[in-house]
Amino acid sequence: MTKATRADAAAALQQLGLSKYEALVFCALQPIEKATASEIANNSDVPRSQVYGAAEGLEELGLVDVQQSSPQQFRAVGLDEARAHLQAQLEREQDRAFNALSSLQQQPIDETETQEDIWTIKGQKTISDRVAQLISNANQRVIFAARDPSMVTENVIDAFVSAKAADVDILITSENPSVCELFEDRSLEAHHTSITPEDDTDDRSGRVLAIDSDVVLMSVLVPAQQNGIQNEVAFWSDGTGFTSVLIGLLETWFSKFIEA
């Protein structure tokens, strides 16, 4: 096992829940049948004083056997057995975490005032994934507009195709003909707005999505501080008074600019 491979393996084991020294000790034991603490320390970056604690942790996880000799010797269990032990450990921790989260959700909260929940998300792919997910939850109607073809990803188009098949009322519009063509290529009607480039002075707007009368998402393009590249940032809200008001405004706006 080369140093690079050992480092990769140790890093991966830490992602599975092992401590740094536990991961390094387990990796050090792989090419040898058994070893003392001194031998492990010499064959790894683990100080000898830390080997015993790491080996004890590995023993509790079922990953290392300890021979009660003088001095003690350690050996790693087989990889199939180790995989099974780690899988079981991950499942236990997952159950513990989500049981605790479920318990937190069930605890009553004393609220003295209503809070309008508005969420922000960043990054074009993340926003596209959220847009597709929101469209897939639509029951009656979807309103959508986008400035740039890069904002109309394949999963967004697939979500619209599925919504159309479910008899959801769809309104798609854009001032950019290239955006409209992406939808039309999949037999989805897209309206080109009557806004002219001269009238459109706001180059920060991104996309707009309204679902039924409950959900709204809007994005803007924000220049990055370091490289000047525009990053997309969106906010969305679900089931709030803010959403109802904004969707009403969007309906008025879209009906004004869609060409007859």
Image: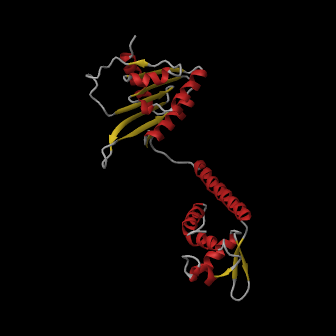
> Which residue sits furthest front?
2
Where is the N terminus found, in terms of image quarters?
bottom right
Examine the image and state in which quarter residue 16 appears: bottom right
Position of 58 compared to 204: left or right? right
- What residue do we see at 72% from left, 60% from top? 84
Image vertical order of residue 29 relative to residue 152, above or below: below
- What residue do we see at 55% from left, 77% from top? 46
Examine the image and state in which quarter residue 11 appears: bottom right
The mark tally for this picture is 0
Looking at the image, can residue 139 be seen?
no
> Which residue sits furthest top?
260
- Seen from the viewer's position, the closer of residues 159 and 185 is 185
Position of 179 compared to 87: left or right? left
Residue 258, position in %: x, y? Answer: 39, 16
Residue 247, position in %: x, y? Answer: 43, 26
- What residue do we see at 46% from left, 36% from top? 237
Looking at the image, can residue 178 be seen?
yes
- What residue do we see at 64% from left, 73% from top? 57
- Seen from the viewer's position, the closer of residues 86 and 216 is 86
Residue 197, position in %: x, y? Answer: 29, 23
Residue 191, position in %: x, y? Answer: 43, 18
